[in-house]
Image (cartoon, rainbow, N blue to C red):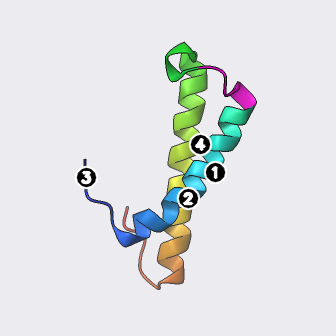
Amino acid sequence: MAEITEEESLAIPAVMRAVGRKIDEIGWDRSFADLTELEMRFLLIVAIDTFRHEMYEINAEFGGGVPF
């Protein structure tokens, strides 16, 4: 597992909330193995988009440039 920066650690709670809301739509009674490819893609897109947005906001707050 890769080491996580302090900024990345700050972004993780927002990602968990966003993914949790998406799982609410899909249904918590299903395992990941039972998700369709489209449902899994949506989960990954939500996670990636939220992470990118949070990292942008965090870096803007701390005065740094966007690291990606």
Q: Answer above or below: position of 60 versus 2.
A: below
Mark 1 vs mark 4, CA separation in Å: 10 Å
Residue 17 got which mark? 1
Q: Which residue is mark 3?
A: 2
**Three-letter residue code for mark 1:** Arg
Magenta stretch: helix, strand or loop mostly = loop
Q: Secondary structure at mark 4?
A: helix
Marks 3/4: CA distance?
21 Å
Q: What separation in Å lies between label 2 and label 3 (alpha carbons)?
A: 18 Å
Name above or below for residue 35 compared with residue 12. above
The alpha-carbon separation of the residues under discs 4 and 2 comes to 13 Å
Are the residues tagged 1 and 4 within 8 Å (C-beta)? Answer: no
Q: Is residue 26 magenta?
A: yes
The picture places residue 66, in percent across and down from the top left corner, at: 43, 70
Cβ–Cβ under 8 Å for marks 2 and 3:
no
Where is residue 11 shown, x and y percent of the image? 50, 62
Please tell me which of labels 4 and 2 falls first in the chain: 2
Tag 4: Cα neighbours inside 10 Å, few (<14), some, or many (≥20)? some
Residue located at (72% from left, 34% from top): 24
**Distance from the alpha carbon under mark 2 to that under mark 1:** 6 Å
Q: CA distance from mark 3 to mark 1?
A: 22 Å
Tell me the magenta residue range. 25-30
Q: Of marks 3 and 4, which one's residue comes earlier in the chain? A: 3
2 and 1 marks in contact (CB < 8 Å): yes
Residue sitting at 51 percent across and 36 percent down? Answer: 44
Percent coordinates x, y for residue 6 in the rendering: 38, 71
Earlier along the polypeptide chain: callout 3 or callout 1? 3
**The disc labelled 2 sits on which kind of residue?**
Pro
